Amino acid sequence: MGSFHSIGLNNVRQAYHDVEPVFEHVADINEAAAKLAAKRFGYKKVSTDWHEVVNDSEVELIIIATPNLTHTEIAIAAAEAGKHILCEKPMANTLAEGKMMVDAIKKAGVKSLVDFIYTKCPANVLAKELMDSGKLGDFVTFRGEFDCSYCADPNTPATWRQLAATAGTGALGDLTAHVVSLSHMIVGKKIVEVFASWDTPYK
Ligand SMILES: NC(=O)c1ccc[n+]([C@@H]2O[C@H](COP(=O)([O-])OP(=O)(O)OC[C@H]3O[C@@H](n4cnc5c(N)ncnc54)[C@H](O)[C@@H]3O)[C@@H](O)[C@H]2O)c1
């Protein structure tokens, strides 16, 4: 996702004549990945420690695209350093950590966003417009589905994403977070009841 955010910022440069993102500082604990990102996107500084980005006085916006387990610590440090924050979903592994992040952001008065990309998809925006127009009547139920194949091959190597200790919430946080964000956007009402079925095809 770090690469995709950098590609997105490059597009900002071309799409808006009066906005010029500066690729100031990139960090990744994998030094080769950090250096590659710097080479691909022109980051001026490279680090293997995210603290260096957070404490860089030239940096105004921090994009947190690291594994879920790290989001809370980085976001709180970024807020305390007065940086605006774009954090990947799921924002935190627990409700308590999420609340700590919100508190730190409110206290610092910085801007923040969680990266629920599907709220910008044209079909979903149209669905919201149709619902808001009243043409479709009232909501009775919301049914969301997220089809994803990135773990469909049983020989796929395990990463942090397959481990509860680092990913936190499994498929619910990884994928269903998007569905929940869409229900918030399109329906705009609190979820009062859910049902689900569950299966792990590759144990
Ligand atoms: N919004 C979306 O649609 C979307 C899609 C995919 C992933 N994500 C989210 O983006 C985040 C990253 O996912 P990914 O698929 O890019 O993972 P990834 O494993 O491909 O990349 C994570 C990178 O973070 C680096 N890293 C790990 N720990 C670090 C640390 N402590 N400090 C600095 N760098 C560190 C790793 O070396 C790796 O390069 C996750 O929170 C994930 O849920 C969001």
Image (cartoon, grey):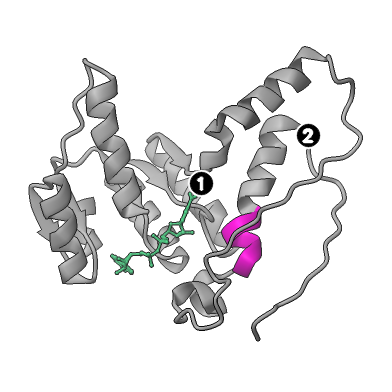
Q: Which residues are magenta?
A: 170-176
Disc 1 residue type (three-letter): Val
Q: Position of residue 118 (x, y in %)?
A: 56, 40
* Image vertical order of residue 113 relative to residue 137, above or below: below
Measure the alpha-carbon separation of dots 1 and 2.
21 Å
Q: Is residue 201 magenta?
A: no
Q: Does ligand 1 reach within 8 Å of label 2's beta carbon? A: no
Which of the pair 83/40 is nearer the observer? 40
Residue under pointer 1: 102
User: Residue 166's spot in the image, x, y percent?
Assistant: 48, 74
Q: Residue at x 43, y 38 (%)?
A: 112
Q: Is residue 185 above or below residue 3?
A: above
| In the foreground, 167 or 9 | 9
Say which quadrant the C terminus sits in: bottom right
Of pointers 1 and 2, the one earlier in the residue sequence: 1
Residue at the image position 22 percent from the left and 71 percent from the top = 30
Query: In the image shown, does 97 or 189 lie closer to the viewer?
Result: 189
Magenta portion: prevailing SS class: helix
User: Residue at horizontal 61%, vertical 69%?
Assistant: 170
* Left or right: residue 150 compared with residue 134: left
Q: Residue 39 has which mark?
A: none
Question: Can residue 83 be seen by looking at this rendering?
Answer: no
